[in-house]
Image: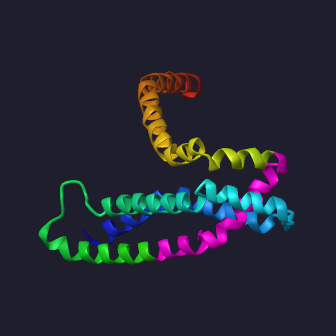
């Protein structure tokens, strides 16, 4: 397996984490550049607090974080199994790489937990709802989401989103042949247009 294999694993892990790190850094930069926002008046703040509870935002954030961590862990661990299996003499190197990867996962997830805890994120949600909704809009929203129908909507939203993603995957799959054809035609046009004709 050797150094080259380990280096390849780490390179691929960096690619898998690129989306998260980019969003994390951009979010941190935006937060640092944003001017301080004044707190909403007490009546509006109370409505926002109730709405956040009714929407079960804290529980949903915890579920999302758990899903992200599980997905990232699965993807990282899959990188340690090369195509064609591992030779017996490479088992020790594989175990070392797994230990290193596990330690990296612990540090990464601790970093995520520290920066995206509910204590950190709750003021962000309060700020967003304050900036987005007026107090007259918050009252009927709160009434709806505290109702049985509103709670059903909240509880079933994750299922709705999962079903939406499944349908979108089908749409994309159906579209792929046309995309590939369009791409091939474009590449052929570029080749003909810019190929060296000397």
Observer-nearest of 94 and 42: 42
Rendered residue at 71%/62% (across/down): 49
Residue 3, placed above or below residue 138 = below
Question: From where the camera sits, is residue 198 visible?
Answer: no
Q: Residue furthest front?
A: 148
Residue 69, placed above or below residue 143 = below
Secondary structure mainly formed by the magenta segment: helix
In the picture, the quarter occupied by the C terminus is top right
Residue 161 located left or right of residue 127? left
Rendered residue at 68%/61% (across/down): 27
Q: Quick check: is 168 in the magenta stretch?
A: no
Q: Which residues are magenta?
A: 107-136
Rendered residue at 79%/49% (across/down): 132
Observer-nearest of 192 and 175: 175
Question: From where the camera sits, is residue 103 visible?
Answer: yes
Image coordinates of residue 189 in percent, x first then y, are 54, 22
Task: Quadrant for residue 4, please give it.
Answer: bottom left
Residue 48 located left or right of residue 38? left
Rendered residue at 47%/33% (across/down): 168
Residue 47, placed above or below residue 171 = below
Image coordinates of residue 180 in percent, x first then y, are 45, 27
Q: How is the image coloured?
A: rainbow
Q: Quick check: is 110 in the magenta stretch?
A: yes
Image coordinates of residue 26 in percent, x first then y, are 68, 60
In the picture, the quarter occupied by the N terminus is bottom left
Number of numbered markers: 0
Residue 179 located left or right of residue 149? left
Image coordinates of residue 73 in percent, x first then y, are 38, 63
Task: Quadrant for residue 38, please give it.
Answer: bottom right
Task: Quadrant for residue 36, please give it.
Answer: bottom right
């Amino acid at each position: 397996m050797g150094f080259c294999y380990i280096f390849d694993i780490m390179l691929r892990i960096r690619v898998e984490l690129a989306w998260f790190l980019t969003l994390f850094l951009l979010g941190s930069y935006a937060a640092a550049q944003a001017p301080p926002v004044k707190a909403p008046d007490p009546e509006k703040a109370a409505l926002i607090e109730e709405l956040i509870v009714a929407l079960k935002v804290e529980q949903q954030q915890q579920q999302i974080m758990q899903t992200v961590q599980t997905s990232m862990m699965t993807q990282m661990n899959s990188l340690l199994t090369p195509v064609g299996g591992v030779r017996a003499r490479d088992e020790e190197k594989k175990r070392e790489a797994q230990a290193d990867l596990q330690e990296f996962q612990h540090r990464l997830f601790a970093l995520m937990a520290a920066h995206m805890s509910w204590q950190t994120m709750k003021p962000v949600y309060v700020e967003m709802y304050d900036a987005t909704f007026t107090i007259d809009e918050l009252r009927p929203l709160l009434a709806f989401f505290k109702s049985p129908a509103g709670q059903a909507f909240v509880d079933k939203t994750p299922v709705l989103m999962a079903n939406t993603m499944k349908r979108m995957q089908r749409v994309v799959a159906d579209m792929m042949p046309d995309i590939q054809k369009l791409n091939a035609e474009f590449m052929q046009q570029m080749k003909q247009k810019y190929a060296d004709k000397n």
